[in-house]
Structure formats: C-alpha cells, structure tokens
Image (cartoon, helix red, strand yellow):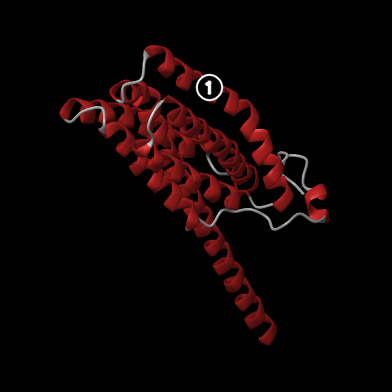
Amino acid sequence: MVFQSHVWQTADLDGMRSAGRKAVVSTFALRLAVFFGATFLITGVKVTYLPVWLDWRGLTGAEIGIIGAAPLFARIMAPPIVALFTDRHGDPRTSVIMLAWAGLVVMLGLPLAQGFWALLVLTLLLAVASTAVMPLVETIAMDGVARHGLDYGRMRLWGSITFIVASFAAGAAVAHWNAGAVVWLMVGAAAATAAWPAGTPWIWPPRCSTACWTAPASTPRRLRT
C-alpha cells in the first residue's frame, strides 16, 4: 500500500513537472513571436520611410543613397563579431538585450543629429544593432524547434505581419502629420523591442559542458563555448 501511494505521488509529481514544462515552452513561443513582431515593426518603418525622413531633413539624393547603402557593409561585419562575443560568454539572451537597447539609444539620437555625417554614423550603428540581433534570435528559435518541437513558422509569421502593418501605419502617419513622424514610430517600436526580451525566459542551456558535445545528432549546431 505504501509502495502504491509512492507510485501515485511520483506520477502526480511527474505530471506537474510536465505541465509546468509545457507552460514554459508555450510562454517561450509566445514571447518569441512577439519579439519577432516588435523587431519587424522597426524594419517595416525603416525600409519604406527612412529615405523619406532623410529627404525631410534636407539631405540630397546622393547623401540619401550613401546612407541607404552603407549599412550593407555593417551586415557583413557585425553578425560574425557579435556571434563570437556571444559564443564566448554563452548567453544569447544577454546579447539580444544589449543590442536591442543599443538600437533604441541610437534611434533616440536620430532626431538630434545634424548634418549628413552624423546621420551616417548613427545609421551605421543602427545597422550593426539590427542586423546582429536577428541571427541570435533565429538561433534561439531554432533551438526551441529542435528541443521542444515548436512551430518556427507560427513564431516567425508575426514578423511578416507586423512588417506589413508598420508600412501601412507609417504611410498613414506621414500623410496625416509629416515625415517627421517616421523616426518616432521607429523609436516606439525600438522601445517595445528593447523592453520585451528583458522579461523573456529564453529556453537555453547553461554554459556549455560535456553535454554540448554529446547532443543528439538531430540537434542543430548552436553557439557554444
């Protein structure tokens, strides 16, 4: 009788642990979907209306073209460097938070910047933050897919939706006010992006140990130390 009671208690405990784990995984998927959505709010405004804002600030067509092209070089350099840093300290969540807040600070500087060179530097810094954060979030998402069977498409879908919504909303804001509204829409989206991961319990293993090298063959390669 004692043995049977112990079995029942063990089964109840396992069930509670399983339910708790499912709740954490579900919360992880939801928060990651929201983070994708917030990130692409910025992109939806920036890609479509940042040139309009730069023209409103008085830049020439050539200067706008340079500012639009220069971030492409940052996309080549920034992700590998940030990945190396993250690989060293083994915590992608910290890197995501740092990059998100860095992007917000840079955007707050855009309305204050005067002249082509100041805007070029800030745009490059913004490109470093925005292009480096996405590979880290994608890595975290794919880790959740491999380890917990999450649906990547459903999480990533919200980024595509908010991109479209942001493009339409930015157009409506420019039509209703003026092009000056563009940067403040970006700041608002960046604030949401920066605030969200700070309270997000990413599902990620602790600093690597021998277990990292004995993962199942189906587990994709992750940032490791």
Residue at horizontal 45%, vertical 49%? Answer: 194
Tell me: residue 78, above or below residue 6. above
Tell me: residue 6, above or below residue 145. below
State the residue in front, 98 or 164.
98
Residue at horizontal 60%, vertical 46%? Answer: 144
Residue at horizontal 59%, vertical 23%? Answer: 73
Q: Quadrant of residue 111?
A: top left
Residue 32 screen position, x and y as percent: 49, 46
How many marks overall? 1
Residue bearing mark 1: 70
Residue 15 screen position, x and y as percent: 57, 66
State the residue in front, 81 or 111.
111
State the residue in front, 217 or 209.
209
Compared across the picture, whether 55 is left or right of 28 comes to: left
Residue 220 screen position, x and y as percent: 71, 39
Residue 9 screen position, x and y as percent: 61, 78
* Amino acid type assigned to the residue bearing label 1 in the image: Ala
Tell me: residue 30, above or below residue 44. below
Compared across the picture, whether 182 is left or right of 129 comes to: left
Residue, far bottom: 2
Callout 1: SS: loop
Q: Quadrant of the N terminus?
A: bottom right
